[in-house]
Image (tube, grey):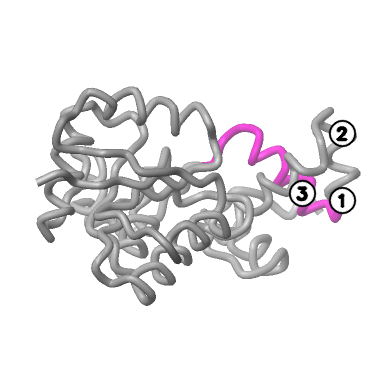
Amino acid sequence: MIVTVFIVDDHYMIIEGIRSLLQNEKDVQLIGQAMNAASCLSFLKTDQPDVVLMDISMPDKNGIELCAEVKALYPQIAVIGLSTFNQQSFIEKMLENGASGYLLKNASREELLQSIQAAARGKSCMSHEATLSLRNTSNKKTFAITRREKEVLAFIAEGLTSNEIAEKLFITAATVETHRKSLLLKLESRNTAELIKHALQHKLITYDNW
């Protein structure tokens, strides 16, 4: 049986990397790609793959929300979360929203192929590191915040706008917005006020930032 695969990721190099890993596989056929949630949903209106490899962090809608939407519209499609974040809450939410599994972007070719085949057969699939994360019974939450995201978070706490933060860090306002959305996702926050509250609770910032 040939398994058809669709990729959703906002990084072209990731898409091309996966394409190169799958191009010589006789049992797997890549039928398309999208770089945002809107393009993904548009594609699925006419073509439904067996498996969707879905990035959890995208500019227009995060993969956790998109997974729930895709599974509601097309329950027969198997979704595999694809991320650089090995955060337990991300993995759990993807699974709760109907994902068949979760892979880190550093997964090996064998791990990727095994996961695709397993998901197509209706089985669960998980990268080794994601499995270890789920087995962690500690109540202490950890967040995979990058150095740049910490800098953006500190400026957000100071009340700076995206344009002001961009000037401070010599990056574009669009890049700041991408970091802001990533922070909201990682800290499970609905808005800036909640983001700062959660950042304080987990000591990612202090009152000295204010």
Task: Say how many tags the image has.
Answer: 3
In the picture shown, does residue 113 fall above or below 177? above
Q: Which mark is residue 160?
A: 1
Looking at the picture, tell me which residue is in the foreground, 135 or 208. 135
Q: Height in image: 20 above or below 201?
A: above
Which secondary structure lies at badge 1?
Answer: loop
- State which mark lies toward you, 1 or 3: 1
Q: In the image, is 3 to the left or to the right of 149?
A: left
Disc 1 marks which amino acid? Leu
Residue at mark 3 to residue at mark 2: CA–CA distance? 18 Å
Dot 1 and dot 2 residues touching (CB under 8 Å): yes
In the image, which residues are magenta? 145-159
Point 33% across, 60% down: residue: 48
Q: Residue at x 42, y 38 (%)?
A: 84
Does residue 146 belong to the magenta stretch?
yes
* Disc assigned to residue 168: 2
Of residue 6 and residue 85, the one placed in the foreground of this image is 6
Sequence order check, earlier mark of 3 and 2: 2
Kindly report the distance in space between the C-alpha atoms of the residues bearing marks 1 and 3.
Answer: 15 Å
Classify mark 2: residues with Cα within 10 Å, few (<14), some (14-19) or many (20+).
Answer: few
Which residue is rendered at x = 15% and y = 31% of the image? 26
Distance between mark 1 and mark 2 Cα atoms:
10 Å
Identify the residue position indicated by label 3 in the image: 208
Residue 96 placed where, x, y %? 30, 70
Q: Position of residue 138 (x, y in %)?
A: 27, 55
Q: Main secondary structure of the magenta part?
A: helix
Please name the amino acid that badge 2 sits on.
Answer: Lys
The residue lying at 29 percent from left, 68 percent from top is 98
